[in-house]
């Protein structure tokens, strides 16, 4: 039976044997191994520090070198700045204040990892930076004060991010690049959540990273969705099967403008790259037709980058039902308006006919009065016969006129009934589009 004897020092799971009965320990051998391993690492570390100070952080020029290790020390907080986030939720104007610091913002702005353009990295914060965690806790506290569910509190968080001003100038610079190009100017690199909060502005990428970081902190399954054709980025939140966007496991969240609910795809303003404001023309709903819900021609996402596993956003079921009801209400309201328009024209025609009938009745009444007076003045059989004929004519015209009045009143009742139905539909419609 043959027995295999392992070589000493070759098993990573066991002790490293520097001495052996069969081989004398060699200090020269160990020094050679140390030089072979340590010197390349040391050179990379030195280069990383030098590259960071010199601003040489474009990995397309220096692949595999820059951003290898970040040896910078997280700075002391200095240069305080108060940023106020705003949101209108359930018809209440809500604000959250956050104190941020110039020194920390500059720390993130010089992060050598920026040039890697690794989308997942931009949702992260330095372990010593608790800003996103603290901000998320403040939002949760607001949600508790308002009596919101977890999913509604997530919507509140999205509202705060959506209302951060859109950085149109940065967007124009980014959009001026050729499709698929990476932005090379350091000032226009993607921003970490802290930077977006500090600047209190951002484009789709910046606001998406912040939203994803908050959703991750809230415990939701989260992803970054990229759209090369639309040159756009959004966030995905884990939702139940059957309610996801683009056959992924996530539902789309738009962050560049307010009013969009989870799952609603936007119409993009090609000039600035942000979503057009999600507004429906409800102001004219009681006067005429209302438009259908905004439609989007988004292509499926180019990439779905998982940020975190977590719980599902189940309120998407309620939102989907609301959107479907809005579509149904739009069709019903427009149908009612069409019926009202037709009945309004019918009423105008009937009013003309009624006025003519009333005129004819007045003339018949006048003839009756003349015949009556003639008979009183000369009560002969001939005058009585003329009076009787005028009376019968008057009665006939009066019956016809009353019939026209009844028909007109019935049409007015139908018209008013439609208005009552339309008012009820409009009230439901407005209630749904105002719901958060």
Image (cartoon, rainbow, N blue to C red):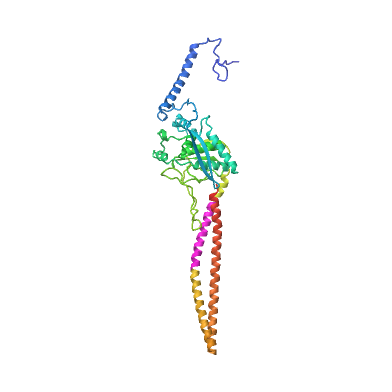
What secondary structure is the magenta-colored segment mainly? helix
Q: Residue at x 45, y 19 (%)?
A: 39
Residue 56 position (above or below residue 291): above
Q: In front here: 37 or 135?
A: 135
Tell me residue 140's x, y (percent). 57, 39
Q: In front here: 233 or 128?
A: 128
Q: Which residues are magenta?
A: 325-348
Q: Residue at x 54, y 76 (%)?
A: 398
Which quadrant: the N terminus? top right
Q: Residue at x 50, y 69 (%)?
A: 351
Magenta span contains residue 136: no
Q: In this orientation, does residue 370 appear?
A: yes
Q: Quadrant of residue 182?
A: top left
Tell me residue 251's x, y (percent). 53, 42
Decide if residue 155 is on the left or right side of residue 276. Answer: right
Q: In this orientation, does residue 240 appear?
A: no
Decide if residue 139 is on the left or right side of residue 190. Answer: right
Tell me residue 276's x, y (percent). 46, 46
Residue 31 position (above or below residue 206): above
Residue 37 position (above or below residue 199): above
Residue 391 position (above or below residue 97): below
Q: In front here: 106 or 406?
A: 106
Total labels: the figure holds: 0
Tell me residue 283's x, y (percent). 49, 54
């Amino acid at each position: 039976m043959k027995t295999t004897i392992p070589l000493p020092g070759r098993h990573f799971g066991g002790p490293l044997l520097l001495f052996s009965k069969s081989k004398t320990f060699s200090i020269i051998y160990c020094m050679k191994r140390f030089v072979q391993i340590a010197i390349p690492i040391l050179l990379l570390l030195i280069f990383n520090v030098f590259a960071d100070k010199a601003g040489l952080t474009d990995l397309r020029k220096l692949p595999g070198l820059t951003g290898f290790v970040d040896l910078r020390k997280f700075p002391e907080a200095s240069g305080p700045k108060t940023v106020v986030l705003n949101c209108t939720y359930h018809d209440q104007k809500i604000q959250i204040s956050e104190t941020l610091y110039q020194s920390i913002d500059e720390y993130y702005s010089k992060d050598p990892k920026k040039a890697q353009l690794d989308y997942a990295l931009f949702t992260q914060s330095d372990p010593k930076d608790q800003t996103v965690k603290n901000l998320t806790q403040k939002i949760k506290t607001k949600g508790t004060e308002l009596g919101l569910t977890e999913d509604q509190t997530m919507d509140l968080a999205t509202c705060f991010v959506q209302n951060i001003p859109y950085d149109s100038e940065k967007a124009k610079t980014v959009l001026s690049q050729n499709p698929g190009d990476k932005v090379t100017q350091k000032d226009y690199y993607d921003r970490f959540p802290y930077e977006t909060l500090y600047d209190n502005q951002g484009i789709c990428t910046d606001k998406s990273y912040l939203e994803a970081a908050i959703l991750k902190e809230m415990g939701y399954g989260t992803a970054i969705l990229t759209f090369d054709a639309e040159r756009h980025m959004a966030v995905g939140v884990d939702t139940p099967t059957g309610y996801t966007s683009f056959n992924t496991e996530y539902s789309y969240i738009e962050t560049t403008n307010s009013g969009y609910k989870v799952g609603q795809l936007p119409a993009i303003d090609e000039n600035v790259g942000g979503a057009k404001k999600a507004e429906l023309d409800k102001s004219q709903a009681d006067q005429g037709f209302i438009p259908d819900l905004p439609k989007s021609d988004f292509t499926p996402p180019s990439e779905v980058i998982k940020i975190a596993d977590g719980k599902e956003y189940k309120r998407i079921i309620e939102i989907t039902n609301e959107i479907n009801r809005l579509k149904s209400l739009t069709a019903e309201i427009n149908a009612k308006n069409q019926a009202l328009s037709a009945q309004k024209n019918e009423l105008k025609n009937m009013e003309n006919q009624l006025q003519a009938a009333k005129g004819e009745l007045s003339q018949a009444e006048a003839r009756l009065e003349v015949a009556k007076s003639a008979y009183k003045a000369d009560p002969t059989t001939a005058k009585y016969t003329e009076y009787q004929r005028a009376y019968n004519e008057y009665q006939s015209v009066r019956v016809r006129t009353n019939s026209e009045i009844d028909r007109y009143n019935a049409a007015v009742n139908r018209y008013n009934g439609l208005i009552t139905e339309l008012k009820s539909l409009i009230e439901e419609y407005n209630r749904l589009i105002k719901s958060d």
